[in-house]
Image (spheres, rainbow, N blue to C red):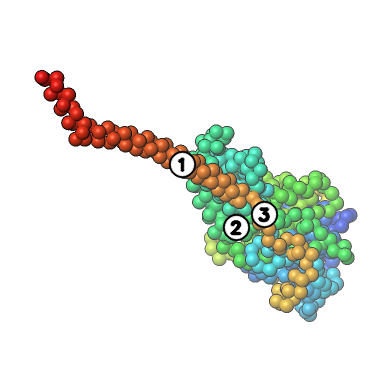
Amino acid sequence: MSDNQAFLDHINKGYTTKGDFLTMGAAIYNGETITNAHVKVPLKTLNRHGLIAGATGTGKTKTLQVIAENLSEQGIPVLLMDIKGDLSGIAAASPGHPKIDERHEKIGIPFEAKEFPVEILSLSEQDGVRLRATVSEFGPVLLSRILDVTTTQAGIISIIFKYCDDNKLPLLDLKDLKKVLQYATQEGKKELEKDYGRISTASTGAILRKIVELEQQGADQFFGERSFEVQDLCRIDENGRGIINIIRLTDIQDKPKLFSTFMLSLLAEIYGTFPEQGDSGRPELIIFLDEAHLIFKEASNALMDQIESIVKLIRSKGVGLYFVTQNPTDVPDGILSQLGLKVQHALRAFTAKDRKAIKLTAENYPISEYYDTKEILTSLGIGEALTSALDEKGRPTPLAATMLRAPMSRMDILTDDELKTLLKKSKLIPKYNEEIDRESAYELLNEKIESAEAEEAKAVAKKEREKLKRSSSSSSRSKRTSTTEKAIIKVLTSATFIRGALGVLNKLLK
């Protein structure tokens, strides 16, 4: 038996699957693509999460595109983070190319150009379905972790949420939260101290500064209504294909705090609302986190713990998370250990640090008699990757250097006119893009303060009137007394009175 035939049998045996699957491409051996040595990923293991890594320009985005397309065809909805702005072309069919036909001939899969159902979402003022969440939906624990506050400050945030719940003050956006914090140490200080204990002005000041920092990264546009319902990410089109939801994030690359805040809230909401389904035959939703290092860049230890917990638990909800980044070391070890599918594009060894990273990366993959993993990691071409997945029983599949299939959709962005046409077809824009600013804690507390000030003004005015009345009454009595005294003095000092008095004295002296 030839080496190539032995390798083909090795791959076919290792990637045999009874249920539905995605075909990534064909395995490469000794620099040659082995036709029909197909590398397959069972649908039932896709909720075990995954990683797409590699140096810039090695084809990570196209790999993401291929997986998203094939999931959509299988009726599985997808959520993509489009940070570089190059994924909108999924909504248009590929124009095709002789090199694509040549690639697919080597793989042993016919190429078919297709467009896919796409919904454009936005966190900012860019066009698309607006994604929002209320402060109340975050809750005090998650919000405290995002703000990275101290234990004492986290306790104050919990008190604020409790006070708002008890007094029916909706916390919808950041101005609501800031207003309640200010109220707690100013006009409402006595009220809160009576029922909830003393609140430090220094602590509320520190929390307010953290909120301002979040606002400066655009969070004031994210917090508010109408809240996005995560079930709308799981839609299927009229042809039974899963909708590919693309979040445009080109304007928040320098706002990692906002990005991590959004991602954590999204994952928490999905985990809290999706039903448990265990290991079903197919996932409910697959989420790709492009430029994943942005999530972890400024995350505190508490926030990292929260992300790691969600990654471990969300699998049982039928949700798979796929991290797309340049180097596997960008992803924390606690999360990396949870990943089932690994697609590793080429890495570059320019420095000693690079060589060390390659060595560490190689150790994350199964040992193979057909490959020197460290060597092949630096020799892979564009559109080629080391692949390791899980079979239907959850066991690692054989390591395969893979010639990846080409995307069926356009490997470029939509034109402005194409984007406008796509947005006009959206069924979610009318639902979520209406601005709502209903009465909430900010307005209710302002009314309460104004009412208290009006009552205080009335009380002051009443006191002034009473004071004026007493002053007027005293003045009147004083005036009457003064008039009487003047009359008596006038009589006593009159000439008639004096002559009469002298006359009486003369008679007495005689």
Sequence-first disc among 1 and 3: 3
Task: Find numbered disc 2 in the image and state the secondary structure of the residue it sits on.
Answer: helix
How many numbered marks are there?
A: 3
Circle on res. 335 = none
The three-letter code of the residue at mark 1 reads Arg
- Name the spot of residue 127 as percent of width and height, x first: 68, 68
Sequence-first disc among 2 and 1: 2
Cα–Cα gap, marks 3 and 2: 16 Å
- Name the spot of residue 39 as percent of width and height, x first: 80, 61
Circle 2 Cα neighbour tier, 10 Å, few/some/many (<14 / 14–19 / ≥20): some
Residue 480, located in which quarter of the rendered image?
top left
Front-most of residues 53 and 28: 53
- The residue depicted at 57 percent of the width and 35 percent of the height is 196
Q: Which residue is mark 3?
A: 438
Cα–Cα gap, marks 1 and 3: 40 Å
Residue 293, located in which quarter of the rendered image?
bottom right
Q: Is residue 306 visible?
A: no
Circle on res. 465 = 1
The three-letter code of the residue at mark 3 reads Arg
Q: Which residue is mark 2?
A: 220
- The residue depicted at 28 percent of the width and 36 percent of the height is 486
Cα–Cα gap, marks 2 and 1: 47 Å
- The residue depicted at 83 percent of the width and 53 percent of the height is 282
